Image (cartoon, rainbow, N blue to C red):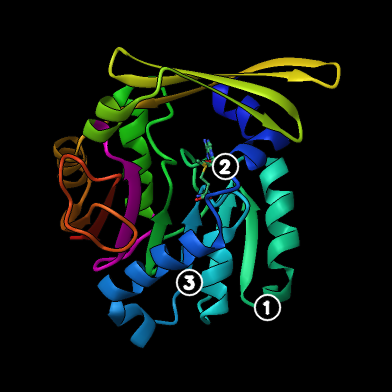
Amino acid sequence: MSWYKHWFADELYMDLYAHRDAAEARQAIDLFERVTGTISGGSRSPLLDLACGTGRHAFELARRGYTVMAADLSPTLLSAAARKTQRYRDRLSLVRADMRRLPFGACFAAVLQLFTAFGYFRTDAANEAVVAGVRAVLPTDGWYMLDFLNAADVARTLEARTEQHTAHGRVVQERAIRNGRVEKRIRISGDGREEEFTESVRLYTLADFNGMFSRNGFAMAEVFGSYEGAVFRDTSPRCIMFARTV
Ligand SMILES: C[S@@+](CC[C@H](N)C(=O)[O-])C[C@H]1O[C@@H](n2cnc3c(N)ncnc32)[C@H](O)[C@@H]1O
């Protein structure tokens, strides 16, 4: 089974990433509105939260009045998203979909793909096909907000091993950079459970994204280094890109 199907199907993922929370989602959506002010001002077209996870950004967008489609591959995370977002059922829909085969026409004003939900597939062609798929669900002048890790910062700050105790037991994480990917091995033990998961993300740089965008009908509009909207640098924690369809 692909690492991302295995790992994002387990409740441990929600535990380990609990600090990636609603407050952080509000900051990301503040930044989205700062850059794409015209959408909030006028368009009635829906937004797509692609690889929505537990729906923290979709929730925030719906709270602000947008019509939102939130898509993810993980039934576990979609169930959590359904619980979290049920009060906005009138304007928020959840759908199980693979980012490589989006079941939509060019109906969205913007696609948001947030918190390193990119670079999962083994080949560059497969990863770039996701950009082409996003282009296909946007009209001209649509927005693509892609929030990725900053490869230079990951290489500089990578912790080879960490250990922590969670509600699920003892969790050991080992990290390394191999063949242009950041690979993480996550081992959980406790409560009679011994299991291992993997995370593997291709370390694309801003230059790589510039290439992928220009080959697939996007022009890079703005890049930030944090959810607060800091200037992007080598040491930034994030690489948050806003591209426009051309
Ligand atoms: C790091 S999480 C980010 C979740 C969410 N955007 C957030 O900020 O909390 C990556 C997400 O990508 C989803 N995912 C992984 N592979 C996918 C695929 N092929 N198609 C759609 N979603 C996928 C996972 O299920 C997971 O929810």
- Mark 3 or mark 2, which has the lower sequence index? 2
Height in image: 28 above or below 41? above
Amino acid at pointer 3: Pro
Residue 25: % across, % down: 48, 61
Where is residue 75, by image quadrant? Answer: top right
- Residue 90 makes an appearance in the image: yes
Quick check: 5 above or below 235? above
Of badges 3 and 2, nearer the viewer stands 2
Residue that label 1 marks: 90
Quarter of the picture containing the N terminus is: top right
Residue type beneath disc 2: Tyr
In the rendered structure, which segment of residues is drawn in magenta? 137-151
- For label 2, being within 8 Å of ligand 1 is answered yes
Quadrant, the C terminus: bottom left
Residue 65 vertical position relative to residue 233 in the rendered view, above or below:
below
Q: Mark 1 or mark 2: which is in front?
A: 2
